[in-house]
Amino acid sequence: MNTALADLLAGEPHVVAVGAETLSAALADQAAHHLSVDWRPPYPGTEDDLVRVFADPRRLDANAAASARMLAASASLVDVRPAAEVVGLAPGQFCHAGPPVDWSRASGPMQGALIGAMLLEGLASAPEQASRLLAEGRLADGTAIELLPCHDRGGVGPMAGVVSPSMWVLVLRDEVHATTSWCTLNEGLGKVLRYGAYSADVIDRLRWMRDILGPSLAATMRAAGPIDVKALIGQMVQMGDEGHNRNRAGTLMLLRDLMPSLVESSGLSSAEVARVARFIGGNDHFFLNLVMPAAKLQTLAASGLAGSTVVTALARNGTDFGIQVSGTGSSWFTGPAGVVEGLFLGSYGPDDANPDIGDSAITETVGLGGFAMASAPAIVRFVGGSVADAMRTTREMYEITLSENPAYSFPVLDFRGAPTGIDVTRVVRTGILPQINTGIAGRVAGTGQVGAGLVTPPMECFVAALQALAAAAPPLSGPA
């Protein structure tokens, strides 16, 4: 029995208010002796599955192991290399954000990004040709076109998340668990490929990133050696970044660490060094593409533990929202991607917005992004809401997570660690959905970014995952 409840019941008569906030408030106004217990019924139709999962004798130890592995995971930037080498992509193969999707179901920004990648790789000479080939599923020489989730290849991609063979990727390593993850280089904000834009200036920028930025960063990393990204994340969280939509401090700290070797070892002219420095320093989101694979390394460490109910991926492809869970391995549980509520750029409005998209919600699985808004109150000016909303949201996320990460601590909450390890059973039992803050892509291919805001996953993802966990649990020894 809860200690506070036991003490209360042992004395003179008191009132226990279970879940009824109105009653609890009234008792407080009357200075009555009472204890408020936050309780609510589980999501309808999940009762039997919850019983089976709670009765699984593996669950507690598996979740303890998953939490410990997530907290212990390290993350260091060790290399920058072409995706063809790191991911194993061949011509006609493209990675993308979110759960599996084909061209016919792909959203506008996903289709736009794939068109742009075809143009970048020289597989089409015009957008119309690229669109036709993608719809047919074959290149002009007959090679089959394959669309592959980034997560299924051990990496992550922001927004549309499209990765093609010649793009360079950041390679991060977890030395504790001997795993690696990767992510593309961040293009900046506005009209960029990851938001579905593919105009000539977008492709020119990607070519510069392929021909100059990627190789120069590779040479810089060979001279600089590994950079402890996990340590930088811990510092940036205490400097007002939350790691998803605000990465200003992280980007500038990274640039500080790169600059000496960039000047000495990149082989660039002074003019090109200046251009690289301006590109990174002027793009507050550059560090996002390091936070994402660092978070992926944490969830990889927790993956594949039989009986564990810890969420290891939150991902969206612009059509579907999908989650993965430790105890069910690489299986996807999906529902419709939601509409982001937030602030819009210029004359754009809700009618211009595509549903939620991107692998960047991996940051929320480790207590960053929407989970860390209390430590980054300035983010509300970008995604909407208020400082009070940010504080309330972070506190609420502790109710659906299993542990707190001391490496990412929040000064405003007396250095409490980030809420880490989303538990499927806690989401279903409380009805509290993970809060995600994110960018908004235009629904029409080629538009680019139209805003930023807040969104939650559909509950059906967690209900489906719970059903699978229940089906995989050992048989009950008695009646359910």
Image: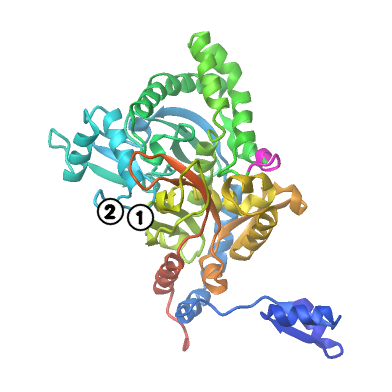
Image x and y of residue 411, in percent:
75, 48
Q: Which mark is residue 72?
A: none
Query: Compared to 211, does 188 lie above or below?
Result: below
Give the residue type that dot 1 points to: Thr
Mark-to-mark CA distance, 2 and 1: 7 Å
Q: Could you tell whether 99 is left or right of 55 in the image?
A: left
Residue 178 visible to an observer of this rendering? no
Q: Residue pushed farthest front?
A: 347
Residue underneath mark 1: 319
Could you say which quadrant of the image residue 175 lies in? Answer: top right
Q: Which mark is residue 105?
A: 2
Q: Which residues are magenta?
A: 235-241
Count how many numbered circles sit on residues in the image. Answer: 2
Secondary-structure class at tag 2: loop
User: Which of the two residues, 172 or 268, is positioned nearer the viewer here?
Assistant: 268
Query: Compared to 399, does 38 lie above or below?
Result: below
Q: Residue at x 30, y 39 (%)?
A: 114
Circles 2 and 1: CB atoms closer than 8 Å: yes
